[in-house]
Amino acid sequence: MSLIYNIGIHLTGVVLKLGAQFNAKLKKGIIGRENTFQILKNNIQKGDKTLWFHCASLGEYEQGLPVFLELRKHYKNHKLILSFFSPSGYEIRKNSPIANVVIYLPLDTKTNAKRFLDLINPELTIFVKYDIWPNFLHELKARHLRAILISAAFRKEQSYFKFYGKQLKQALFAFEHIFTQNEASKALLESINYTSVTVSGDTRYDRVYSQLSLDNSLNFIDTFKNNKLCIVAGSTWPEGEALFVEFINTQVSKDIKLIIAPHDIKPERIKKLQEKINSKTVLFSEKDNHNLAEFQVFIIDTIGILSKIYSYADIAYVGGAVGNTGLHNTLEPAVFGVPIVIGNNHVKFLEAKALINNGGMFEIDNQLKFNETLNKLIADSDFRAEAGSYNKAFIEKNKGAVIQILDYLRI
């Protein structure tokens, strides 16, 4: 691996440690990485058969989960190691039932890569979507250990496809096979002479489709909704919340119920949001002390239940694309046949473009457009139902990536 890359990784480590003094999230990552090797020593014995799954964060974990679950069933005598780079993934899934060991991935230095693989020696490694670490991959290849990349999505502006991206490009060749989300990604790989590639689609479709087979009932949401039309705003950020608050305060009739599930549930943030809303509002943390049917707005100041809440939505808004934080998971409400509203900053999200073109998702870029779109969906039940049906059919059409991956692995 190039000297420049390795110097850059070491400098990154220094910067992260400095930043951790001022950022709680970075601090969690630093502390977690310091404990990784001891956790592995305590849980992995010489001679253990292992599989290694790596995800950048929570989104990639959810994306890879249907594959992980199938491998868990097949490799009953193996220990499964699940690694994250981001604290937002590790902290939420550190007790994941699919894995025997959940850890932070150490920084991608040559020394860490050798030490890490000495400890786990995985029979199979699966990376999800991206977070491609050259030193770890180079060491996997040097040891002739199997590794595949699933749900990969590439763009032509990425370093892999530029004259200056030789070192990162070589890292891709450590994967014995890459499963891409689309034909464009396959073509980009073939442009650098990587040919062991299959267009399988995105495993997220399999993941969200499996939600339909679960019990999604939440009695307190039933009580709150009270058989009225319900709008669910999921994974919201301040920019989108501002649009939503204005809509609630000036546009919504008393017959409409609204649920807001902010991405950031810090108490001070929740309090500020609640204070801006004129309608009668209740928090999830207060739900046991109130008759929920009496409230118009329900703010979910907890995590882990949004996918079930979407099953109660007649209309959904998904946050992240009004500002620059990145669009959150639009497939979760889509699988329930719900029309979806998002911001217009979604250029990197292929599924958003497809859902918009398909007629089930609507993009907005200002308050007027936001109000007009929601009011039309509220007023026109036929339009609302038709748009939602397009979304559900889109999920049905695009599931099946997991079967292709398992077939390649001969499982």
Image: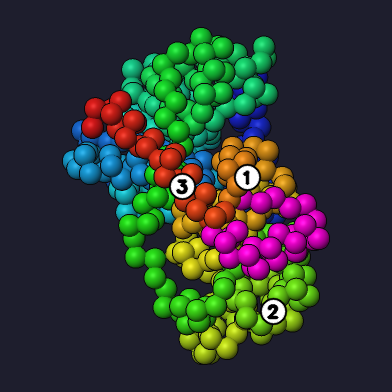
Residue 367 is inside the magenta segment: yes
Q: Is residue 88 left or right of residue 402?
A: right
Whether the magenta-drawn stretch holds residue 384 is answered as yes
**Residue 51 left/right relative to 368:** left
Marks 1 and 2, how far apart at CA? 27 Å
Q: Which mark is residue 76?
A: none
Locate residue 297: give its quadrant.
bottom right
Q: Residue at left 55%, top 78%? A: 228
Task: Tell me where residue 128 appears, x and y as whole percent.
Answer: 46, 36
The amino acid on which the numbered mark 1 sits, given as a three-letter code, is Ile
The residue that disc 2 covers is 253
The label on residue 393 is 3
Please state the extent of the stretch shown in magenta in the rendering.
361-385
Say which of 2 and 278 sits in front: 278
> Which tag, 3 or 1, sits closer to the chain's start?
1
Which residue is painted at 53% across and 66% down in the image?
313
